[in-house]
Structure formats: structure tokens, C-alpha cells
Image (cartoon, rainbow, N blue to C red):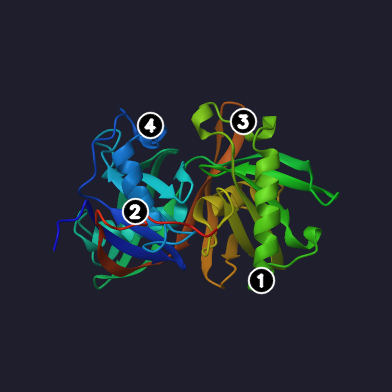
Amino acid sequence: MKRPLVKVTATDYHTAGEPFRIVSVGLPDIAGATVLDKRAGASSNQKLEQIRKLLVNEPRGHADMYGGFIVEPNDDGADFGVLFWHGDGYSTACGHGTIALGAWAVDTGLVAAEPNGETAVTIDVPSGRVQALVTQENGITTKISFRNVFSHAIAEAVPVALDDGRTVLVDIGYGGANYASIEASKLGLSVEPKHLDELIRIGRQIKWKLNETPESNSQVDERLNGIYGTIIFDEVNSTDSELHQRNVTIYADGRVDRSPCGSGTASRIAQLAHSGKLTKSMTLIHDSIIGTRFLGRIEEAQTHGQSSGVIPVITGSAFHVANVEFLLFENDELDTGFSLR
């Protein structure tokens, strides 16, 4: 058999149903002093883009595939860095990926774990420094919490004119990336798989209509700007101690998150804290469109410059599902693959 043009070894996890494909060896050199710098140049690195496309496209991936390339941290204060990728490029944040990376770091021994307690895995991501807090009992991981960067509300009741003539009002928040949020009932929908095509259509539309507005360009570093996704949610229940919502996040260019979305949950926590609907003594029960769950809480309130916000912590679980070697041969007419959506 001929030698392949490309051979990539990956480790696959899922977090609440959302895939996360990890590549830690065999990557080309990626220019940049920080992880954010590396992200800025990643799309122009031809070898890296060949690997990303190979892993994300069919037949080796799918339209909503997600993953990360392990890179050097910004400094020795973190265990490693990561470039998050998906079908349209590279994101600034990924909470479900951070949870998966916590599991991977402990499973592989990259970070020595406390078998009866909590182990902090510190990761540099494009939006800053985050932690995956891995809890084990008798050497078995029972939960993983994601401590995010400073997250805050940006704007409320921002009008968006839809193509069907309706104008809807959305809230915008930051949780490592900028998200627009709207209750599904305001669109005449509910967060159920039977409505997925329409949820994708409207979520994608809202994202692009907002992407160049002042509200989408509120971050000091312009590389963190733009609307990354639209969170469409249902109100499920509320008590003095819990707020229960179900959501689907349509991210990038019409991609669908199967999990409740980690950085999106952080954005929701910041928005709900700003509106007074979620307090430090409460838990956000955040379900996904497939019924999986994250639990979110406010660890502390903070103020950065003119912005008041929170440090959110989101708890879930991740599971190792595969170790895979992907190959590309010279005579493969599909090259790095294709996408039907």
C-alpha cells in the first residue's frame, strides 16, 4: 500500500453529546506568541488547514464537527493551549471543548490527578485563560466544571429585522465569544428536534444581521468581536434556587451544538445575572435540544473597566469515545472531503 499524503492521529470525546476531536501530535509550526495570535494566523497556515478540513469534513467528520489542536500555552502558568476549530474555521472559545480537554488531560496523565478530589487543568484559549476542574472519586471522573473568563451582558432588546418581515428583539452577551439570545416562543417555535431546520435558519439569520453592528464589536481586542452564535431558548421552570431553561445554539455559519453550549451558557449566566433573574445563590439548569444538561452558577461578580459581569462556572461531563488514525491518499478524488450543509 502506498504511503498516505496525510496521517493524523486524533482522540475523540463527547461532552453532553457534542463531539470534540483532539489532535496533540503531528501538527505544523503555528506562528504567534499567544494562543490568540496563533488563532489569528491559523487559517492562512496551509498545512494546518488541510488537517482541519480533513477532520471536520465528510466522510471523516460532519457539518457540526468540533475539535481542538493542542499548542503551547502563553506562559508556564497554564498546562497547555488549544486552538478550537469547526467547519467554518477557528473559534475564540469553546466550553464543551474545555470540559473534554479536562477529561483528556487527566485520562492521558498529562496532568496528574487527585483520585479523590478536584484537579485543576489550566488551559490557554484564544479568549483567555480558563480551567477545567476535574472531580474524581476512587480514580473515576464524576464531573468536570469549566471556570470561564470574565463574562458580561452587552445589550438588551436589540431589534433584528428578519427576512420574513418580522422584527424581533434579542439580548447580546459575552462568554468568551459574543452570543445573541432570544426566547423560542418569540419566534413561534420551541426548542425541539422537529423544529431544527427552522431554528437553524433563523439563528443563522440573526447572527449575520447582527455581525457588523456596534453591539457585536464591544470587546477591546477586535479579534474577539463579531457575533459567534444565536442561542434560542425555552423557559422550563423557575424557583427561588433554580432557573431551568432549554436551548439550542446555532454557531458559526449555521452549525448546531448538541450540548447546551459551554461558552453560550456562560453568556446566558452573565445576561441573567445582569437582569436580576439569576443570583449567586441560584443554579442555572441548562438543557440542550437532545436533553443533555449543564449546571451553571456565578462564582463571583467582577468589574472590568466599564463592564460589570461575572466569572461563571459550568458543570457537565465528557466521555472518551475513540482513538482514530485518519488517512488521506494521493488518489482519493474527494481530497480533504466535502460538506452537504
Q: Are marks 1 and 4 in contact (CB under 8 Å)?
A: no
Gap in angstroms between the C-alphas marked 1 and 4 = 38 Å
Callout in the foreground (2, 3): 2
Q: Of the two numbered discs 3 and 4 on the same chain, state the one appearing first in sequence.
A: 4
Instruction: Specify the label residue 335 is tagged with.
Output: 2
SS of the residue under disc 2: loop
In the image, what residue type sits under mark 3? Asn
Gap in angstroms between the C-alphas marked 4 and 2 = 23 Å
Image spot of residue 258 (x, y percent): 52, 65
Q: Which quadrant, please, contains the N terminus? A: bottom left
Binning the other alpha carbons within 10 Å of mark 2 as few (below 14), some (14 to 19) or many (20 upward) gives few
- Residue annotated with mark 1: 192
Q: Which quadrant, please, contains the C terminus? A: bottom right
Q: Are marks 1 and 2 in contact (CB under 8 Å)?
A: no
- Residue annotated with mark 3: 217
Q: In the rendered view, tell whether residue 263 sits above or below residue 107.
A: above
SS of the residue under disc 4: helix
Instruction: Specify the label residue 41 is tagged with.
Output: 4
Q: In the rendered view, tell whether residue 136 sits above or below residue 125.
A: below
Gap in angstroms between the C-alphas marked 1 and 2 = 35 Å
SS of the residue under disc 1: loop
